[in-house]
Amino acid sequence: MYIRLQKALSEYGIMSRRAAESLIDQGRIKVNGKVVLPGVKIDPETDTVEIDGKSVELSKGKYVYLMLNKPRGYITSLSDERGRKTVLDLLEGVSERVYPVGRLDYASEGLLLLTNDGDFANKLMHPSFGKSKTYIVTVKGNAAGAEKQLSEPMKIDGYMISKPEAELLRAGENKTVFKITIHEGRNRQIRKMCAHLGLTVLKLKRTEIGPLSLGDLRTGRWRYLTEDEVHSLLKDI
């Protein structure tokens, strides 16, 4: 049965559809030895797929769901052309091939989910499902009062974001700490919100996704999600 390449890569736990679409656009995926174009369909039973010259196995195993406390200095990609460390380097003991659900940029840290369940990943990443994400954000200088502006809708990259919620945690002469919850998770949204108000981000850590919290998971460590946690993330989707 023929299905779109990006759907196959997602369903077989190779990467998310979005990641697959990006690699297809970059000409980094071959099917049966030939670079493919967007929209191509494959037969997972008979066609061979290569990503960056490496063959991938299109076979379904068991689904796994992981929580990682991502440190700074790691990228949320499967590989990096510049040789930087990826979050997969932190997953010692994980035999299944998993990929990140969404992103945390290189300088950000905190809660990151990984899985080989394409349907789960697509549901959580799609902005229309509105799963909240909470961050602890440290900015330069005394910015007390900015929580009011950070709690208002604003236009980012030409798009009016949904209303965030911002709470002042503490303010000092050199830095201010906010708790900010957003409901979309667009590319670098928190950093762009702060830049829009002239605030310089010193540290950004994601602590919650929907009902899920980092808890006492140490930086650089991971654990499996429980069945109840997976169900709670998918509730109302």
Image: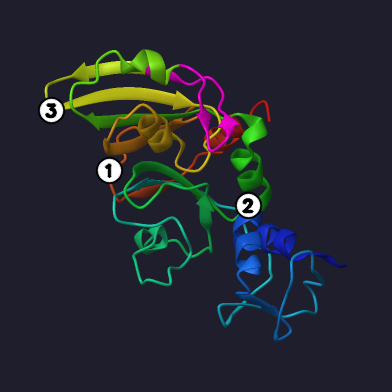
Residue type beneath disc 3:
Asn
Disc 3 residue crowd, few under 14, some 14–19, many 20+, Cα 10 Å: few
Residue in the image at 36% along x and 30% along y = 194
Indicate the quadrant where residue 176 lies.
Answer: top left
Q: Nearer the viewer, residue 87 or 80?
A: 80
List the residue tagged with mark 3: 174
Residue lying at the far bottom of the rendered structure: 33
Q: Quadrant of the C terminus?
A: top right
| Residue where numbered disc 1 is placed | 218
Q: Earlier in the sequence, mark 3 or mark 1?
A: 3
Amino acid tagged 1? Arg
182 vs 73, left or right, is: right
* Amino acid on which the number 2 mark rests in the picture: Asp
Reply above or below: 183 against 15. Answer: above
Q: CA distance from mark 3 to mark 1?
A: 27 Å
Answer whether residue 187 is visible to the viewer in this image.
yes
